[in-house]
Amino acid sequence: MKRADQYDSDEHLCWYLSRPSDELTDAVRSGWLGGLGTVVDLGCGLGSELSYLAGLGWSGLGVDLSEGALRRARVAVPACQFARADVRRLPVHDGWASALLDRGCFHYLQPADRPRYVSEARRALRSGGRFLLRACLPHRPSADPMSEEYLRDLFHDWRIHSITERGIPVDRGQLRAIEARLER
């Protein structure tokens, strides 16, 4: 049986943020994300982070597996492109992106799939490009190895600017996550 799309109901509201995230606005304001360029939002959802960057002059591509999210994002953010795609097989050429964002995709992957995700992010991002990753932590006991050390191991051949556990805002409160600022 096919699982219902979480964006066709209110299920997505437990992680949704209707404005650009504090982490993203800080990365832009501080200059860490770099100058204008091309960004890929991995697991873009409704496109609120892409909308913010497009308003600043960035070009962008949002990828998600949810057709419901993409349908709504295309209407809300006509300045950007959206594609139904697996983050382990991005529909872009090598070195196409100057920045990557992930605010809600990485932690949904099985640990065995995450090295492929890291490899694909490396392929898609140009040399010197920046990656703002927010990996949510399980809210109940879990076998998921998600931790700062785990991310350092997975991204061992990237330049790591910072990896910090923090709360990230959502419209209905806050989620515990690890924010990683990485450079290819």
Image (cartoon, rainbow, N blue to C red):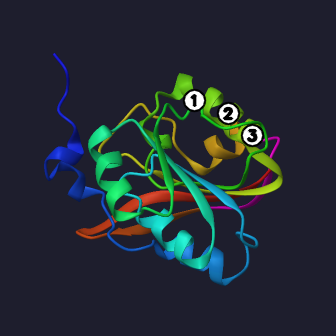
- Does dot 3 land on a helix, a strand or a loop? helix
Quadrant of the image occupied by residue 169:
bottom left
Q: CA distance from mark 1 to mark 3?
A: 11 Å
Q: Residue at x 22, y 43 (%)?
A: 6
Q: Depth check: 27 or 35 in front? A: 35
Q: CA distance from mark 2 to mark 1?
A: 6 Å
Question: Is residue 18 depicted above or below 119 in this figure?
Answer: below
Q: Amino acid at mark 3?
A: Arg
| Total marks in image | 3
Q: Residue at x 49, y 73 (%)?
A: 52
| Highlighted range, magenta | 155-163
Relative to 65, 162 lies left or right: right
Proximity of marks 2 and 1: CB atoms separated by less than 8 Å: yes
| Mark drawn on residue 122 | 3
Q: Amino acid at mark 1?
A: Arg
Quadrant of the image occupied by residue 14:
bottom left
According to the picture, the residue beneath numbered tag 1 turns out to be: 88
